[in-house]
Amino acid sequence: MRQRLGVVLFTLAVTVVCGGLVCGVNALLADRTASNAQAARQRVILRLLQGTAEADGLPGDRVAALFQDRVDTVTLQAPGQAPLTAFRPKGTAAAPIVFPFRGQGFWDAIAGFLAIDPAAKKIVGIEFTEHAETPGLGGRISEPAFRARFAGKPLDQPGPDGRRLRLVSEGTAAQPTEIDGITGASETSRAVERIVNRAADTILALLAAGGQP
Amino acid sequence: MSPAPLTPRQAFTRMLWEENPVLVQILGICSTLAVTNLVKNTLIMCVGLTLCTAFSALTISLLRDRIPRQVRMMVQVLIIAAWVIVLKIVLDAFLPEISRELGPYVGLIITNCIVMGRTEGFAMGNRPLTAFCDGLGAGVGYSLVLLVIAAVREPLGLGSFFGIPVLPSDWTRWNLMVIAPSGFFALATFIWVAKAFKGGTPRPAAPAGAKPAA
């Protein structure tokens, strides 16, 4: 009996020490981790709004200051529509608006930001901030070469089936609304097509309904 | 497990080649297949695994006389998990970009057969410094194999090395090299060559704690 109690107490002690170690390190670095995540988001938004990599090499606090300086965070609302957080450049009414998007990819959720020119109804840029697609195949969605394929694509010419954009086999995009997919990652390409089209539907509906901050 | 006590130095060096965890003990196959299509990710994964193996072995060796036999596996997993989570948190805080790229693989070190194999098979019966060196050696041995495989897979599959294009842009990428099956081919070829090189030394018995690759 006594021996059994010893086993239980030993296991409990190891659990408490290990748990304490993990909690301690986590608590110690939580601020840093949170500000890293925040800075990563802000870098992406700044890149999309300005089209430059100005914020990329900067440390977290400088990025936050730059973000504060250049970006307005607004919530677009319209009657009958769910409100949407968006980011626009400070001071000008024109230029792109950046919207977050999220949807189910092949393995796990894909999330990111989409920059849209509201007047021309065109994509300005896209970035994927979160995904778990197969490294080297679907994972290539985060490569600049793939993201660049979205720039300038019109969102106001939906096809008969309602899809505004379609991802086609790599190298066969011929129409303005067609984008080269990724060979070897058909499911990821399909998921990205679905996610981007759905995000565009929501955003354009909101803008058409007079969505205002 | 081992009749004659090893010096820390021997414990380290024998894991590099003679007792290489991947080539001889065929442990840690899961991550060998999963992460070796990019050299950079492989390198970070290897550093992480080496640190986790070494510190888990050290901790368990320090506690080895106190750990009750009935619950030793549970205690080992607890300690390994604690070290791996600490590593994940540190990566998130100091190398956020790389941490994001590695995604779930860092957390999966917990289930890496090498870590458990070394703690159960060696650290439970050896002095802390020797166990630490053994864990370090196992990690470095694993890293050597993975880096060689990655150095074959990334150029053939993506035409680059460490993310830098090395092959002409009209190089036809072998998609096969990017996906997991080519990891099997590359690993099998490597083991074959390594065995031939060693000149047919008899294979040691499977170490305790070995489990099928999951």
Image (spheres, coloured by chain):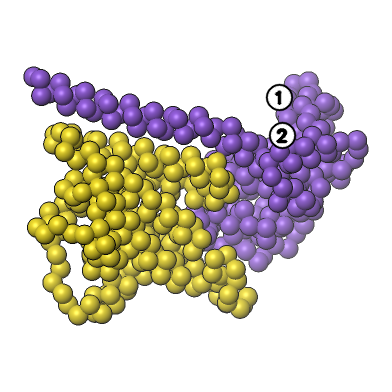
Chain colours: A purple, B yellow
Instruction: State the residue in front, A153 or B130.
Output: B130
* Residue at (54, 32) in percent of width and height: A30
Residue highlighted by disc 2: A202
Q: Is residue A100 left or right of residue B103?
A: right
Residue highlighted by disc 1: A82
Instruction: State the residue in front, B140 or B107.
Output: B140
Measured in 3D between alpha carbons, the distance from the residue under mark 2 to the one under mark 1, in whole angstroms, is: 9 Å
**Mark 2: secondary structure:** helix
The reply to whether the C-beta atoms of the residues labelled 2 and 1 are less than 8 Å apart is yes
Q: Position of residue A51 (x, y in %)?
A: 79, 51
Q: Is residue A154 visible?
A: no
The three-letter amino acid code for the residue at tag 2 is Thr
Q: Position of residue B199 (x, y in %)?
A: 19, 80
* Residue at (37, 41) in percent of width and height: B83
Give the vertical position of B27 relative to B97 (above or below).
below
* Residue at (63, 57) in percent of width and height: A143
Q: Is residue B123 left or right of residue A128?
A: left
The three-letter amino acid code for the residue at tag 1 is Ala
Q: Is residue B202 left or right of residue A47?
A: left
Q: Position of residue B159 (x, y in %)?
A: 55, 72
Say which chain tag 1 marks: A
Rendered image quadrant of residue A83: top right
Rendered image quadrant of residue B64: top left
Say which chain tag 2 marks: A
Which quadrant does the N terminus of chain B fall into? bottom left
